[in-house]
Image (cartoon, rainbow, N blue to C red):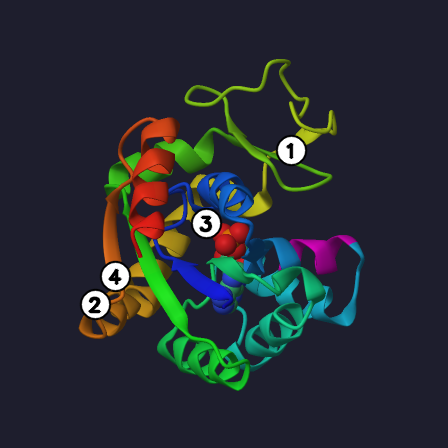
């Protein structure tokens, strides 16, 4: 039976870093809506061009296009065992749509780990973040530095700083999280799916806690 998990948490909580490791360990597809938008942007597709202005402002891309993009992604064969969703859903409408998509596949959301990190820590994390151009691996100049500055440890591609990791955009993204995405915490708590994870610890400890939570499901 395919299993689906939603990784919740503010920008900078470490969702992408954790999702990569944990999805591989559990044999699930890593589905990151932010990575899908950046891929579209890189390839200059219509979707990428549409998403660009929202992303640069740190705002959410409209629900209809985001939902259609993820629906498509969840039909790819690599999701046959399920998926770890990172950055989706981000609004109540997206959460409803996800529930419907999964029920059409005869599945459901099996668990929702919430990675919590204090807001002041998020700004520090995002402003020192470096992302790999090829596949989106993330590093931090202080907390998780690459072996060679400017070069990805995993595929040797160039590291760059995302436009939306600038301090003023980071603040918008954090407030968008609290206004539009945080209601999902209650939504999933009410249906008994939320598991809280302390994200304010070393990367390996967060991975350990996440794996423990998901494997006990
Ligand atoms: P992320 O990489 O998850 O931080 O996402 C980067 C940007 O992509 C966000 O600030 C939004 O502009 C856009 N984005 C990613 N996921 C979503 C989503 N589920 N709904 C709307 N916009 C999204």
Are circles 4 and 2 on residues that touch, CB within 8 Å?
Answer: yes
Q: Which residue is mark 2?
A: 189
Mark 3 or 4: the one toward you: 4
Who's the residue at 29% across and 35% down the image?
121
- The span picked out in magenta is 37-42
Measured Cα–Cα span from mark 3 to mark 4: 28 Å
Measured Cα–Cα span from mark 3 to mark 1: 16 Å
3 or 4: tag closer to the N-terminus: 3
Q: Which residue is mark 4?
A: 194
2 or 3: tag closer to the N-terminus: 3
3 or 1: tag closer to the N-terminus: 1
Q: Which residue is mark 1?
A: 160
Q: Is 3 left, or right, of 180 in this rendering? A: right
Measured Cα–Cα span from mark 4 to mark 2: 5 Å
Q: What SS does tag 1 mark? A: strand
Q: What SS does tag 3 mark? A: helix
Queried whether the magenta region covers residue 26, the answer comes back as: no
């Amino acid at each position: 039976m395919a299993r689906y998990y939603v990784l919740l948490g503010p920008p900078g909580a470490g969702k992408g870093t954790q999702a990569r490791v944990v999805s591989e360990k559990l044999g699930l597809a890593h589905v990151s809506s932010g990575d899908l938008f950046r891929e579209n942007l890189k390839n200059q597709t219509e979707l990428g061009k549409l998403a660009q202005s929202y992303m640069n402002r740190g705002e959410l891309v409209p629900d209809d296009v985001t939902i259609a993009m993820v629906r498509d992604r969840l039909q790819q064969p690599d999701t046959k065992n399920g998926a770890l969703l990172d950055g989706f859903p981000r609004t109540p409408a997206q959460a409803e749509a996800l529930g419907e998509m999964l029920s059409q596949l005869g599945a459901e959301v099996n668990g929702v780990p919430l990675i919590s990190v204090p807001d002041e820590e998020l700004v520090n994390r995002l402003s020192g973040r470096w992302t790999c151009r090829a596949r989106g691996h993330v590093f931090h100049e202080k907390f998780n530095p690459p072996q060679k500055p400017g070069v990805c440890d995993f595929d040797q591609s160039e590291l760059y700083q995302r436009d939306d990791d600038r301090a003023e955009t980071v603040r918008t993204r954090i407030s968008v999280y609290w206004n539009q995405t945080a209601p999902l915490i209650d939504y999933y708590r009410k249906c008994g799916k939320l598991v809280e994870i302390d994200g304010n610890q070393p990367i390996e400890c967060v991975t350990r806690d996440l794996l423990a939570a998901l494997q006990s499901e």
